[in-house]
Image (spheres, grey):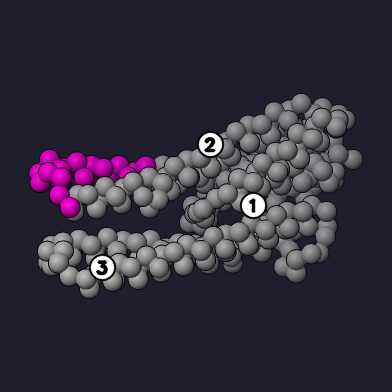
């Protein structure tokens, strides 16, 4: 993908910032509970009120995060179609975001853009889920050591709650689902372009549209933002890999679409 920032980038950045704030406040709530147990003996309502306020803030932030993710997904979808069919429904359209400008056939170009996007999602989510597994494993390791040393204390119960919440395993499973789904969509896309030799049949078009719809549905269901740090770090490598993949299929070749 090109170095130019896509129009949805601003919304994703805002959603990512909200996500970071959400995580910090969530961790703060854990420390508040631990502090309450250690230093107040769980006998004061002051920290309970703080906990209630934190829950309200978390709920509000989660709503905002979902709102910006949804808006970014809609803008991304419009940019996908605008760049493919040369439309101008969004003022900041980025034609060079995808690396398939050499494809003339609009349907093939649309599918190639979608295929490339799936490839990036598949690889970025793979790294994210690996990192999350490491994070969760560290928590499990520390929790097991703590239980062996002190037994099932209130602090260990809080840690276990953290582990089982969306902040821990919940998000990890979400990322894992996105990775698995995008991997299947990517493999299915490869199968479709492999089946096309010369003429595009109605069956091929139907399968292409189905893949596009399924991928857009996957993006719409995501409750997290793909890591911008991983994207920036792996962008050049993934782009080169995509161009190599693209060159292997005649349907993605410019001459094959004239």
Q: Nearer the viewer, residue 153 or 207?
A: 153
Question: Which mark, by number, is residue 48?
Answer: 3
- Was residue 136 drawn as part of the magenta stretch in this picture? yes
Say if mark 3 contacts mark 1, CB within 8 Å: no
Question: In terms of sequence position, does the residue under pointer 3 or pointer 1 come before the other?
Answer: 1
Main SS class of the magenta portion in the image: helix
Quarter of the image holding residue 56? Answer: bottom left
- Was residue 181 drawn as part of the magenta stretch in this picture? no
Question: Which mark, by number, is residue 180?
Answer: 2
Tell me the residue at 26%/47% (across/down).
160
In percent of width and height, residue 195 lies at 76, 26
Would residue 115 be found to the left or right of residue 34 on screen?
right
Q: Is residue 207 above or below residue 88?
A: above
In percent of width and height, residue 140 lies at 26, 42
In percent of width and height, residue 229 lies at 48, 56
Identify the residue under disc 1: 1
CA gap between label 2 and label 1 equals 22 Å
CA gap between label 2 and label 3 equals 40 Å
Quarter of the image holding residue 199? Answer: top right
Say if mark 2 contacts mark 3, CB within 8 Å: no
Tell me the residue at 78%/45% (across/down).
109
Q: Give the number of the mark in front: 3 or 1.
A: 3
Q: Give the number of the mark in front: 2 or 1.
A: 2
Disc 2 residue crowd, few under 14, some 14–19, many 20+, Cα 10 Å: some
Question: Which mark, by number, is residue 143?
Answer: none
Q: Which residues are magenta?
A: 133-154
Q: Residue furthest left?
A: 149
């Amino acid at each position: 993908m090109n170095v130019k920032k896509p129009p949805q980038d601003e919304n994703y950045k805002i959603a990512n910032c909200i996500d970071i704030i959400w995580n910090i406040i969530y961790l703060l709530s854990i420390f508040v509970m631990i502090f309450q147990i250690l230093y107040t003996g769980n006998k004061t309502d002051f920290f309970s009120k703080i906990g209630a306020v934190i829950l309200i803030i978390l709920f509000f932030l989660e709503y905002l995060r979902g709102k910006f993710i949804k808006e970014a997904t809609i803008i991304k979808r419009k940019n996908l179609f605008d760049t493919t069919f040369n439309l101008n429904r969004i003022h900041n359209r980025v034609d060079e975001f995808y690396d398939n400008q050499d494809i003339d056939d609009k349907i093939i170009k649309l599918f190639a853009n979608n295929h490339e996007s799936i490839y990036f999602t598949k690889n970025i989510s793979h790294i994210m889920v690996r990192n999350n597994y490491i994070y969760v494993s560290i928590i499990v390791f520390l929790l097991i050591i703590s239980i062996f040393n002190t037994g099932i204390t209130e602090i260990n119960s809080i840690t276990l709650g953290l582990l089982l919440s969306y902040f821990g395993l919940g998000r990890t499973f979400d990322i894992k689902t996105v990775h698995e789904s995008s991997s299947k969509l990517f493999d299915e896309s490869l199968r479709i372009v492999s089946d096309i030799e010369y003429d595009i049949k109605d069956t091929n078009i139907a399968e292409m549209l189905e893949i596009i719809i399924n991928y857009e549905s996957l993006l719409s269901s995501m409750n997290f933002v793909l890591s911008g740090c991983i994207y920036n770090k792996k962008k050049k490598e993934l782009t080169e890999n995509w161009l190599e993949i693209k060159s292997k299929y005649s349907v993605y070749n410019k001459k094959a679409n004239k």
